[in-house]
Image (tube, rainbow, N blue to C red):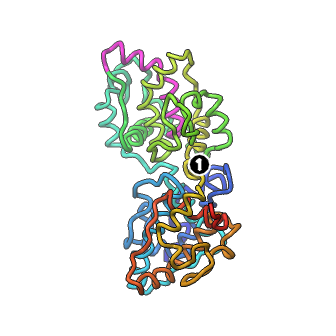
Amino acid sequence: MLSLSSLLLPSLLLAGPCGPGRLDDRGGDPVLGQRVFVEAGCVRCHAVRGAGGRIGPDLGRRTRPSSYAELAAAMWNHSPTMAEKMRELHLRRPTLEGDQLADLISFLYFLNYFDEPGDVTAGRLLFREKGCISCHRAEGEGGDTGPALDGISRGASPLSIASSLWNHGPAMAAAVASSGMELPTFAGAEILDLFAYLRSIGRRQGAPRFESAGDPVRGEELFTDKNCAACHGVFADPGEELAGPDLGRSELRGSVTVIAGRMWNHWPQMASRMEEVGMEVPQLTAADLGDIFAFIYQARFVGEPGDPVQGRTVFEAKGCAVCHGADGEGGVGPALRPNLAGRGPEEVLQAMWNHAPAMQTKLEAKNLSWVELTPKELTDLTTFLAAGLPAD
């Protein structure tokens, strides 16, 4: 049987509850969530980066989730398919207690916080295709306009390389412009492959450097101090005008290093905007980058708060009232107000999860389809139920 230690996942490096630190009460402990993943039997069907079952998708190699709500909705919508497969395999559906569902979702979200290994061979090709070799020397080849890149320590962390790339941005942009070239951009995992190559040819001396998971509280302070907030918001007021994208609401998936690559791709626009307003390019250490990304990653996990008014609309539109009563007084299904009022939305979600088999049985008896929910609908609904099913 697969043991907890055999997963060898980076979540063990996370700083504490809710991944890299904690900004509010939503979330869970990803380290405990890893234990739930194994002990509740998720690992029998699902693998994480190759470790685990092969019946369901590998949850470490899927589209990276952008929030707690997105993962929760995916699990809810998948419930009937999962139940059918478990019946077929004579497996017992787990009942989750305490904070187990919050911990499990936290684990599944934050396991993508850290990088998968890059491809050295692909990185070597990228070093040429992206034009790096025109200015930088590596393995005895290349230009000398920029610093040689085969002196990087093999133990250097991806974030330390990313921060050097960022800090070198102004000089590199000027050199590239004078040569008539364009700044390279990176798609998908290309930056991971490039960094893997640079570390593979680097100096052998020096122990590997392991960066912490990042401190989101310090990251939030740096987001303001380094003037990121002058152009970007993180779930800013919808009416606020921003010079750059809102990093809470924009499409931003991937590990911290992949996000660093996207940040680099945005460099020309950022540099132009900073020049317009007379702002200096902020210098960032690897720790600074890690903390800022931890803040953004954590904020996106938490997401925007649910709207109980919209939650009532979901409650009625999805037919919840048909079984549970217009005011949650109960009927075909159990009473909701006395059982859920005053709980947190995560507790409500767990109660829904545990109730799903009974709900599915009753829906099938009435020849009704499973009630699927979008991430926003689920957030609004659980907020509404936790608030005691307010009238408006």
Image coordinates of residue 281 in percent, x first then y, are: 54, 21
Tell whether position 161 is magenta.
Answer: yes
Image coordinates of residue 119 in percent, x first then y, are: 36, 46
Quarter where residue 309 is shown: bottom right
- Main SS, magenta region, reads helix
Question: Where's the C terminus, which quadrant?
Answer: bottom right
Q: Secondary structure at mark 1?
A: helix
Quarter where residue 54 is shown: bottom left
The answer to whether residue 291 is above or below residue 22 is: above
70 or 95: nearer the viewer: 70
Outermost residue toward the top? 178
Tell whether position 135 is magenta.
Answer: no
Residue to which mark 1 is pinned: 298
The answer to whether residue 146 is above or below residue 232 is: above
282 or 114: nearer the viewer: 282
Outermost residue toward the right? 342
Residue located at (47% from left, 54% from top): 65
The answer to whether residue 59 is above or below residue 14 is: below
Residue located at (48% from left, 41% from top): 257
Residue 8 visible somewhere in the drawing = no
382 or 252: nearer the viewer: 382
Residue 238 visible somewhere in the drawing = yes
Q: In the picture provided, is 369 more to the left or to the right than 235?
A: left
Image coordinates of residue 25 in percent, x first then y, are: 68, 56
The answer to whether residue 89 is above or below residue 188 is: below
Q: Hey, what amino acid is under mark 1?
A: Gln
Residue located at (46% from left, 80% from top): 360
Residue located at (59% from left, 71% from top): 350
Q: In the picture provided, is 169 more to the left or to the right than 223?
A: left
Bounds of the magenta segment: 157-181
Image coordinates of residue 285 in percent, x first then y, are: 59, 31
